[in-house]
Amino acid sequence: MDRKIIHVDMDAFFASVEQLDFPELRGKPVIVGGTSSRGVAATCSYEARKFGVHSAMPIFQAKKLCPNGIYVHGRHERYEEISREIFSLLSEITDDIVKVSIDEAYLDVTNLYLSAEYIGKYIKKKVKKETGLTVSVGISYNMFLAKLASDWDKPDGFFVIKKEDVPDILKPLSIMKIHGLGKKSAEKLNNIGIYTIEELLEYDKDVLTNLLGSMGEEIYNKIRGIDLRKVASHTERKSIGTEITFAEDTDVFDEISARAYKYLHEVNEMLLKKKMLAKTIVLKIKFEDFTQVTRSKSLEVYTDDEKNFKPLLKELLGKVEYKGKVRLLGITLANLISNREKQLEIFDIIGEEDGK
Ligand SMILES: [Mg+2]
């Protein structure tokens, strides 16, 4: 099955935050990045870009192009704050997320039931609603193409690159659009007359490897829509649990049992938060002599309701042969699946309305 990858990229992030916080800056060319002539522009508003100003441009040069621009110092704490807000909203959607910078992330939504288009539109609406800022969303079946897509109709963009579009849709693009191809490599290609992806597609892998070294093959593959990088390196979560060593070893059953129920409650809360359902409960007990026992019991159905696990825990606690004081107790919920209804609840707010 093809993967569903979403690339999310805030539009002119720092400048947009300035325009959000200071309404008098709206509609004006704003350049963030130090007011000293020796600095460089960190971000420019779209109004400033019309003058040819772009990020990483020395301020003195920007001032020549855009003398009436508004030059402001960056307020990084504020940008971090909004960034955290956006990422916490994205991480509600999936754990398969990788943050690539303060204002940019990839999400792998392959395992979600809703279409990537639906989720992408939801993200745009939700970010706008919660922060007042616009974001561009790109969707495709790999990271390279998703990033290309988010850049396609910025700002406030929404673009999908489908498998059947590739490579034709890429052909007219400048090779500068290939994320990962550095300036020097681009120059080497320009030197032999390659400016567009269409021109680059004519060269074999060997030629590109000779010219660009190890990156040659990567570029060769990317422009053919091949990019196998994974969004998140973590493996799928199969259990959620906690285990705690007691401050003092105990053989008082009521105390041990009270702890067990308390941990069950905590672990069940984590389950709810992860929007998962579980079937199995595992009790682990370690004694003062460091021997340990592990007992587990499963339900017939998946659940995220704590009270379904309680009778199982009672049974497990009763089954353990207590041969001394207990020093550690652990509760784990295992056999997890995602809770489809809970996932759908998150997306409720956009309803049937069209995105963008
Ligand atoms: Mg951005």
Image: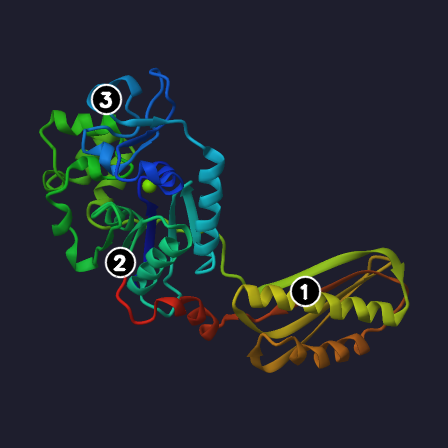
User: Which comes before the other along the chain, label 3 or label 1?
Assistant: 3
Quadrant location of the C terminus in the rendered image: bottom left
Specify whether residue 343 is in view: yes
Question: Quick check: 277 left or right of 54?
Answer: right
Q: Which residue is mark 2?
A: 356
Specify whether residue 233 is in view: no
**Front-most of 152 and 78?**
78
State the image coordinates of residue 119 (x, y, percent, origin top left): 34, 62
Quadrant location of the N terminus in the rendered image: bottom left
User: Which comes before the other along the chain, label 1 or label 2?
Assistant: 1
In the rendering, which numbered label is found on residue 266?
1
Secondary structure state at the residue bearing disc 2: loop
Neighbourhood count class around disc 3 (C-alpha, 10 Å): few under 14, some 14–19, many 20 upward: few
Amino acid residing under circle 2: Lys
| Alpha carbons under labels 3 and 1: distance apart | 58 Å
Camera-near label (3 vs 2) is: 3
In the rendering, which numbered label is found on residue 67?
3
Camera-near label (3 vs 1) is: 3
User: Which comes before the other along the chain, label 3 or label 2?
Assistant: 3
Question: Quick check: 196 left or right of 268?
Answer: left
Residue found at x 47% / y 38%: 78
State the image coordinates of residue 79 (x, y, percent, origin top left): 44, 39
Neighbourhood count class around disc 1 (C-alpha, 10 Å): few under 14, some 14–19, many 20 upward: some
Q: Is residue 207 positioned above or below 343 on the image?
A: above
Amino acid residing under circle 1: Glu
Residue found at x 42% / y 71%: 344
Amino acid residing under circle 3: Pro
The answer to whether the residue labelled 3 contacts the one labelled 2, judged by CB atoms less than 8 Å apart, is: no
Q: Is residue 207 positioned above or below 38 on the image?
A: below
Camera-near label (1 vs 2) is: 2
